[in-house]
Image (cartoon, rainbow, N blue to C red):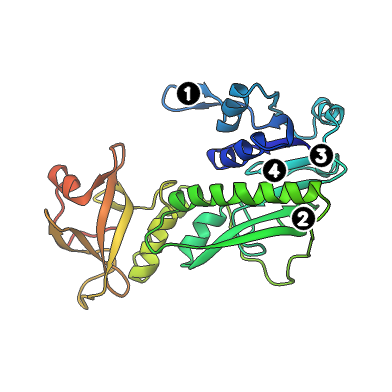
Amino acid sequence: MRLVFMGTPLFALPSLNKLFESEHEILAVVTRPDRPKGRGLRETSPAVKTFAEKKRLPVFQPEKLRDKLFIRQLLELKADLFVVVAFRILPREVHTIPPQGTIDLHPSLLPKYRGAAPINWAIINGESKTGVTVFSIGDKVDAGEILMQKSTAIQPEETAGELSDRLAEIGANLLLDTVDAIAQNRVTKYTQPEVQPTPAPKISREDARIDWQKTATQVKDFIRGMNPKPGAFSTIGGRIIKIHRALVVCTSIPEAKPGQLIRVDPREGIFICTGDGQLNLREVQLEGRKRMNSEEFLRGVRLKEGDLFI
């Protein structure tokens, strides 16, 4: 089949590579425009563009998806199918161009976790299972007919970044299976169940502030779900500290307040009170510094029992 691939971040690369190495033909790759990045604000290309240029694939980077020139370019390609992985919301005049329609790889078991951050929210909400879905794009976001799904268990200590890497590989294989099935006219579509979809809205930096009133398990899952970006954080003495990994300690301290430091041990780490127990902070980061384990952190930052994270 003749394909146009649309995607931007690293999550999309396994899918693009899998399709590139298949018998299908990628006519062009569509991604976002280059953006300034880092302290020097150097123009940086999306991961998908870098890959496409190495493979000598044509690349389109429209600012606006309704741009008439861009739509004319898509029409002239005469693709059979558009394939989307981690891209923008497509207007109707784009996703209806190819005769086989447009399909999207979404990292959740739709209709659960529709939205921009399904991997993060699945972990934050303590889910034990998630997966990937390939569906047909329609007029409503993430609500089209399902073509294929595959589930996987979420490991107890797995972070959003680690799960994203796994789902990218699982999704790439499922996406290729779906494209093969469409090419062979053997795909079966079915409507998403009529249930209240679980929202998965975009996460901002401020959303990553830790609520120590929650249970130790809930805070731990929150930390996992915010790792690596934007990074769960709290403040102590006016300093912002990101927390990347923590272990649950079941022992509760009745007289302690949520967010209060219970114990600071150079060998065993930082112990902090939550709504129903303690967390042992294992990997932390002072704002502007690198990530490090709590033992290394305590060599350079002085904390004492009774200090309060807010």
Residue 310 in sight from this viewpoint: no
Q: Which numbered mark, 1 or 2, is in the foreground of this view? A: 2
Whether label 4 touches label 1, CB < 8 Å: no
In this rendering, position of residue 265 left or right of residue 112 = left
> Crowdedness of circle 2 by 10 Å Cα count: few (<14), some, many (20+)?
few
The residue singled out by tag 1 in the image is 41
Q: Which numbered mark, 4 or 1, is in the foreground of this view? A: 4
Whether label 3 touches label 2, CB < 8 Å: no
Q: Position of residue 3 (x, y in %)?
A: 76, 36
Q: Position of residue 11 (x, y in %)?
A: 55, 43
Image point 72% across, 42% down: which residue?
83
The residue singled out by tag 3 in the image is 94
Instruction: Quote the CA–CA distance across marks 3 and 2.
Output: 14 Å
Q: Amino acid at mark 4?
A: Val
Of callouts 3 and 4, the N-terminal one: 4
Q: Amino acid at mark 2?
A: Lys
Of callouts 1 and 2, the N-terminal one: 1
* Res 191 label: none
Of callouts 3 and 1, the N-terminal one: 1
